Image (spheres, rainbow, N blue to C red):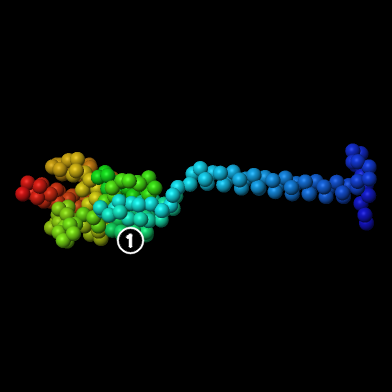
């Protein structure tokens, strides 16, 4: 049955149904306007915050072109874009140190560094330590000599952290080195042997420097 009731304030000639239809139609128009406005704002935000995805990274002395997402971590880029899987991801939240690499000679947790922030910086990973002829870096040799790790998942991080630490203190005491690399954790908890191996590596490095 047709609804022909009108409210007191409704203009004459309009039914209650006409008014409700008008409100719904107006709401739809308002929503469309709101959505449209939102779209414009988001487009503006993207333009303002956008970054050039294609970038050049200096990794282990090589210029590497790579397509990097805005939110991508350096650990992700190294492992999954550049194939440098020697850098491990353990916790992925700046707690274990397995992902440690050098950025301009300073150890960093690469899981907690956005790749776009290291443009123009020098990245060094475990793959870059040995010489081109295969001669191991002194710290790597120390690990071989002392068999310092069990499963070795944490090894790359420890070696990179030690390499960075020795750049500032090439002749540390055992306690100083332990403190210097205390940001690295080992799930096998083989800390004593690890430290012995890294101290041996530091010793080899000093011997080579004075040879
Ligand atoms: S994976 Fe980066 S600190 Fe653990
Ligand atoms: S040797 Fe296994 S995690 Fe360190």
Q: Image point 21% across, 44% down: which residue?
A: 165
Which of 3/101 is in front?
101
The residue lying furthest to the left in this view is: 211
Which of 168/177 is in front?
168
Number of marks in picture: 1
Q: Image point 33% across, 61% down: which residue?
A: 83
On-image quarter of the N terminus: bottom right
State the SS at label 1: loop
Name the residue carrying label 1.
83
**Position of residue 142 measured from the top left corner of the image (x, y, whole percent):** 14, 54
**Position of residue 173 measured from the top left corner of the image (x, y, whole percent):** 14, 42
Residue 170 falls left or right of residue 91: left
Which of 3/151 is in front?
3
Residue 111 falls left or right of residue 146: right
Residue 139 falls left or right of residue 99: left
**Position of residue 124 measured from the top left corner of the image (x, y, whole percent):** 26, 51
């Amino acid at each position: 049955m047709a609804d022909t009731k009108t409210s007191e304030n409704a203009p004459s000639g309009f039914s209650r149904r006409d008014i409700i239809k008008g409100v719904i139609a107006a709401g739809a128009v308002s929503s469309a306007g709101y959505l449209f406005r939102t779209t414009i704002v988001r487009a503006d935000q993207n333009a303002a915050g956008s970054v050039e995805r294609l970038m050049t990274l200096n990794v282990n002395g090589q210029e590497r072109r790579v397509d990097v997402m805005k939110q991508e971590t350096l650990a992700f880029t190294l492992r999954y874009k550049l194939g440098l899987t020697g850098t491990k991801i353990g916790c992925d939240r700046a707690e274990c140190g397995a992902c440690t690499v050098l950025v301009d000679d300073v150890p960093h947790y690469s899981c907690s560094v956005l790749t776009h922030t290291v443009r123009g910086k020098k990245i060094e990973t475990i793959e870059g330590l040995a010489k081109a002829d295969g001669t191991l870096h002194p710290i790597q040799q120390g690990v071989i000599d002392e068999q310092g790790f069990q499963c070795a998942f944490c090894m790359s991080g420890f070696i990179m952290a030690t390499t960075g630490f020795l750049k500032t203190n090439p002749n540390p005491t055992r306690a100083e080195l332990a403190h210097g690399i205390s940001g690295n954790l080992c799930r096998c908890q083989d800390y004593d042997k690890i430290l012995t191996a890294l101290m041996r590596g530091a010793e080899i490095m000093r011997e080579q420097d004075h040879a």
